[in-house]
Amino acid sequence: MRALRSGLLFAVFSALAATAIAQAPAIGAAAPDFQLTTLDGKAFSLSSAAKAHKAVVVMFISTQCPYSNAYNDQMKDLANAYASKGVLFVGINSNKTEDAAAAVAHAKAHGHTFPIMKDPNNKVADLYDARHTPEVYVVDPEGKLRYHGRITADHEDPASSPDLKNALDSYLAGKPVARAETKAFGCSIKRV
Amino acid sequence: MRRAIALLIVLAAAPIRAAAPGELAGELDAAGLRQTLAREKGRVVLLNFWATWCVPCREEFPELSKLQRKHGPAGLRVIGVSTDFAKQKAAVRTFLSRQRPAFPNYRKKGGGDDQDFIEAVDSSWGGELPFSVLYDRSGRKVRVFSGALPVAGVESEVRKLLESR
């Protein structure tokens, strides 16, 4: 009986995992719209922000994950560098293990002045099937997904191939993004 | 001189496997991982990717040792691969010396493109940790597990694979 129960649980787990993978938005398809509140209390709507910018870079981030923290300076520098080019960077913290106070302190410590939002019950992470931190999505003014993946090619070397920067430069120049879907290591998003 | 060169060649080609309990067995890139798995044909393999800072990874680590001790004699081989940063090698060694796992552990070799390594493991893997892959005795990939392992279910699956020759 115990073996049967274990088998059933195992099958359910596998089915759920397969479903989650199938929900990930594809490049060129509509990026799911969402509304959240920033850490400083302002309402944020992805569709509104996208219409007001050339692109919005949605970054799933963490205060504790070493992979995400390895990119703190690059997140700040890219957000500042691309603001003048009409690109808005935003951070989303979906980890149930990191509260708003921790996210505020982390942003302050690392000079992150871009909008950051807590994602209660990881609803936005689920909409995007975001698996880990850092994980990045670039959304155009029409709400279409232009890039999904990593910031650079090697998490141990911040100077390795700058895939997010390359994608933004190509997109802003009206060229196709050569590598629109990339992968890198990250910490699992701690879901409810 | 020729004998010394021949010895060097043999040593360079030899798999880095004979690590003491609690020590890293070596470093792996995508090709090294494939070779390591190829050497285990004939065994059921549970490949587990972890990092010292990853809480669910640390929590399931003792369970992996239990699986190895219980089913190792029947042909199970658990293999761990740490994806900790190069600068955290000392933390990896400390972790392993405390855990004294019943299975070999490697570290993912630094450098190169993360995606090459990730894709070599499984195309559905997004790079999140922990991540595990179960292979049958022929080396065929049977299941992948994103996130914490459902240990009871995995054990039942391992048992079935060990029983099927």
Image: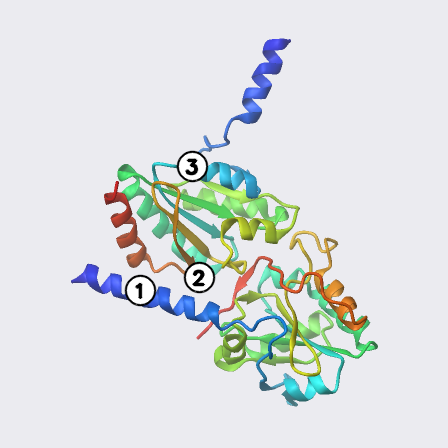
- Mark 2 or 3, nearer chain start: 3
> Identity of the amino acid at label 2?
Gly
Protein chain holding label 2: B
Instruction: Kindly identify which residue carries mark 2.
Output: B147
Camera-side mark, 1 or 2: 1
Q: Position of residue A167 (x, y in %)?
A: 73, 66
Q: Which residue is mark 3?
A: B21
Q: Disc 2 or disc 3, which is closer to the eye?
A: 2
Q: Secondary structure at mark 1?
A: helix
Chain under disc 1? A
- Would you say B63 lies left or right of A146 here? left
- Are the residues under marks 1 and 2 on the same chain? no
The numbered mark at residue A71 is none
Residues marked 1 and 3, same chain: no
Looking at this view, is A122 or A178 the one in front?
A: A178
Q: Nearer the viewer, mark 1 or mark 3?
A: 1
Residue at 52% over, 78% down: A127
Q: Quadrant of the C terminus of chain B?
A: top left
Q: Is residue A101 visible?
A: yes
Residue A187: x %, y % from top left: 54, 62
3D distance between C-alphas at marks 2 and 3: 26 Å
Residue type beneath disc 1: Ala
Dot 1: within a 10 Å radius of its alpha carbon, few (fewer than 14), some, or many (20 or more) residues? few
Q: Quadrant of residue A9?
A: bottom left
Task: Describe residue B76's horizontal placement relative to residue A91 as left or right.
Answer: left
Q: Quadrant of the N terminus of chain B?
A: top right
Where does label 1 land, which residue? A11
Q: Position of residue B86 (x, y in %)?
A: 62, 46
Tell which subunit mark 3 falls on.
B
Is residue B83 visible to the viewer in this orientation of the structure?
Answer: no
Count of number-bearing discs = 3
